[in-house]
């Protein structure tokens, strides 16, 4: 069950990345992979083996269309273009609730926040609130583990947990800065 949930989040993130990359320009599968690597390397690096079925799924859901063009060198290339449904799906994926799995949270939240420019002000407000709330929950969870006198946390665990608290605190500060910027941009 957990593996199915994790796989579902991974597939959704790949689809989100594809839709975001082709939002402003049509690309081939190779160019989509390159743009994802250029823009999202710290968070994701999907292979062609992951991109191809995701492109097929998005085409079946009418989120994108493809067209074949012959290059000057005589090579056939397939270009992908986002549709109106694709723009709506992109927004839905960005605004969809984040995983309850703390391991996935920071990378998925980073991807979603990186794509916030395609949302309107109210949608960004909703995204920022959702991300910040979840980050605060995870930070509190880690703090509770450290503060629970009945749990035996060894030295190494304590160091890692302290670092995790700092990571969440920094992330929350970043989101608060985004919220402030969003509130100022009327």
Image (tube, rainbow, N blue to C red):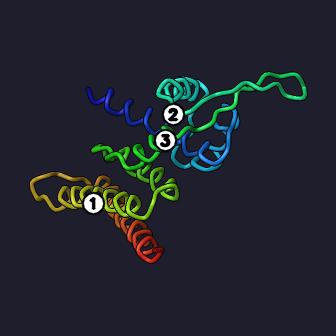
Q: Which residue is mark 1?
A: 133
Q: Is residue 25 above or below residue 127?
A: above
Q: Which residue is mark 2?
A: 63
Disc number lying in front (2 or 1): 2
Structural distance between the alpha carbons of marks 3 and 2: 11 Å
Mark toward the start of the polypeptide (2 vs 1) = 2
* SS class, disc 3: helix
Identify the residue at image location x=43%, y=72%. Answer: 177
Identify the residue at image location x=66%, y=31%. Answer: 29
Q: Quadrant of residue 165?
A: bottom left
Image position of 138 (left or right of 179) = left
* SS class, disc 2: loop
Identify the residue at image location x=44%, y=68%. Answer: 178
- Residue 126 rendering spot, x and y as whole percentages: 34, 59
Please give the label number shown on residue 16.
3
Disc number lying in front (3 or 2): 2
Mark toward the start of the polypeptide (3 vs 2) = 3
Question: For the residue carrying disc 2, how many other residues have a C-alpha within 10 Å: few (<14), some (14-19), or many (20+)?
Answer: many
């Amino acid at each position: 069950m957990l593996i199915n949930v994790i796989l579902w989040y991974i597939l959704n993130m790949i689809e989100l990345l594809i839709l975001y990359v082709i939002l402003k320009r049509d690309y081939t599968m190779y160019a989509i992979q390159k743009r994802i690597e250029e823009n999202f390397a710290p968070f994701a690096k999907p292979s062609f083996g992951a991109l191809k079925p995701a492109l097929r799924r998005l085409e079946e859901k009418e989120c994108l269309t493809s067209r074949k063009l012959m290059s000057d060198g005589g090579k056939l290339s397939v270009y992908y273009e986002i549709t109106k449904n694709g723009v709506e799906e992109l927004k839905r994926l960005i605004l969809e609730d984040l995983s309850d799995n703390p391991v996935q949270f920071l990378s998925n939240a980073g991807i979603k926040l990186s794509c916030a420019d395609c949302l309107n002000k109210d949608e960004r407000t909703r995204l920022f609130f959702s991300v910040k709330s979840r980050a605060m929950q995870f930070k509190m969870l880690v703090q509770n583990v450290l503060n629970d006198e009945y749990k035996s946390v060894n030295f190494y665990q304590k160091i890692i947990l302290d670092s995790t608290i700092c990571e969440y605190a920094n992330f929350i500060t970043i989101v608060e800065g985004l919220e402030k910027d969003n509130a100022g941009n009327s």
